[in-house]
Amino acid sequence: MITQPIKFGTDGWRGVIALDFTFERVALVAPIAAQILYQTYGESTGSRTVIVGHDRRFLAEEFARCAAVAIQAAGFDVKLSETFAPTPAFSLIAHQQQALGAIVLTASHNPGKYLGLKVKGAFGGSVGPEITQQIEALLTEPPTFETTPGTLEHFNPWPSYCETLRSKVDIGGIQEAINQGKLTVFADVMHGAATGGLTQLLGDKVHEINTNRDPYFGGGAPEPLPRYIPELFEQLEAFRTSNGGLTIGFVFDGDSDRIAAIDQNGNFLSSQILIPVLIEHLSTRRGFTGEIVKTVSGSDLIPRIAKLFNLSLYETPIGYKYIADRMLTTEVLVGGEESGGVGYGTHIPERDALLSALYVLEAMVQSGEDPTQTYSRLQAQTGFDSAYDRIDLPLASMDVRSRLVEKLETQPLQEIAGQAVVDCLAVDGYKYRLADGRWLLIRFSGTEPVLRLYCEAPTLDIVQETLNWAKNWANQF
């Protein structure tokens, strides 16, 4: 197998452990990242400190230690986490402690053979491409670092992180509803970094599953998609009662920056459903204001929800760092992406799954509604009804990926699933709007030989028809 070059994708550099992602490469990248963070944020923070954290993947703490030692040897002070924690916890701590930023060893939602490195800025969010491009440019000719090592100390990220989250919501109201049996909460932490999060925040009546460390992630991937969470569906089905109380099951990805949910009737709730619910709650019950930021793969309902509540809308390419950039210059209420990353102007410019879960729970307690009920009501209010799905199609190789890209560039699609293409947006991938109002987005993973296919249409049958057409088209090459 050929080792892939070190390239930063939508949120960090990822690679196959022991092939692309090695201790030698981490020791190369980490101090260069620290140097670029210093050049970017050193003057404004007056700091030489870098936060280093990790998730629960295979060898994650050893890779974090490797990164920390290499950064320390380059003359920077390092605070190394003594335990796994959500990625947003490290972003938050970097901001709160006015550090240069954070280096987090995680591969997020990727399968178990992957590990990765995310770079977070002093502002508490993912750095933009202008920063990662500087890091990549120095990899072939690394700079000369300080000869005097910095310091290295350990810390526990959970206490300050949980304290901050508690301050954002009515924790007492949520706990009271749980303790009185009016609200039951399940959480599939997918063997990842969210483990223990909701129980620390809300108490031991939260039903957490898949809390053990499993580098294989049950043979799947720690991604909040229906095919990876059969146990949560089973648990909710077994628990289903007619006592009138509200029940919800949350799903957190491997490093707890993405979220999805299952309602009490077994319906899967992607962020395409949760984001409208969150917008309504924060704008009406909380009285917060600000812009709504969505990516090109976000639902067409989101602009209608923004208009319903007299909020402005801004659209970005896929990748939360683009949303974070917007949050640094504009007052944002909610910024979200279809893959489960949601962030808030009330917090750092970073997606945070545990905070999203707390806001959803607060909305349920204060409205008395299941999120699906709220979503259906919002659809009725806007006069917009649709279905959405996404499939990930593994490709045989990166060469196949290149051929598909060339085909899309040189022979643009004119018709899809029997419908004429009326528009194509190529900001991030290829988003085709069709004559009957549906849309199909064809996009390539930046870290794996995977083709991502997204579709929104009036009905789920039309969504599946469109995705099957796209899958059959791609399999020709």
Image (cartoon, rainbow, N blue to C red):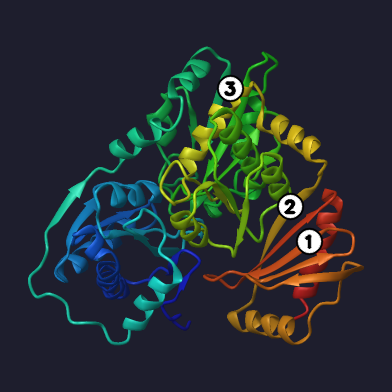
Separation of disc 3 and disc 2 at Cα? 27 Å
Residue under label 1:
439
The answer to whether residue 19 of the structure is visible from this angle is no
Q: Residues within 10 Å of mark 2 (few under 14, many from 20)?
A: some
Residue type, mark 3 in image: Gln
Q: Are marks 2 and 1 in contact (CB under 8 Å)?
A: yes
In x, y percent, where is residue 89?
36, 46
Q: Quadrant of residue 211?
A: top left
**Disc 1 on helix, strand or loop?**
strand
Farthest residue to the right: give it: 418
Residue drawn at point x = 82 percent, y = 44 percent: 385
Residue 134, numbered circle = none
**Disc 3 on helix, strand or loop?**
helix
Residue drawn at point x = 21 percent, y = 67 percent: 71
User: 2 or 155: nearer the eye?
Assistant: 155
User: 425 or 218: nearer the eye?
Assistant: 425
In x, y percent, where is residue 48?
18, 62
Residue under label 2:
300
Q: Quadrant of residue 171?
A: top left
**Earlier-in-chain disc, 3 versus 2:** 2
Quadrant where the C terminus sits is: bottom right
In x, y percent, where is residue 92?
34, 47
Residue type, mark 1 in image: Trp
Separation of disc 2 and disc 1 at Cα? 9 Å
Separation of disc 3 and disc 1 at Cα? 35 Å
Residue under label 3:
366
Q: Quadrant of residue 138?
A: bottom left
Would residue 44 appear left or right of 449 to someone viewing this image? left
**Earlier-in-chain disc, 2 versus 1:** 2
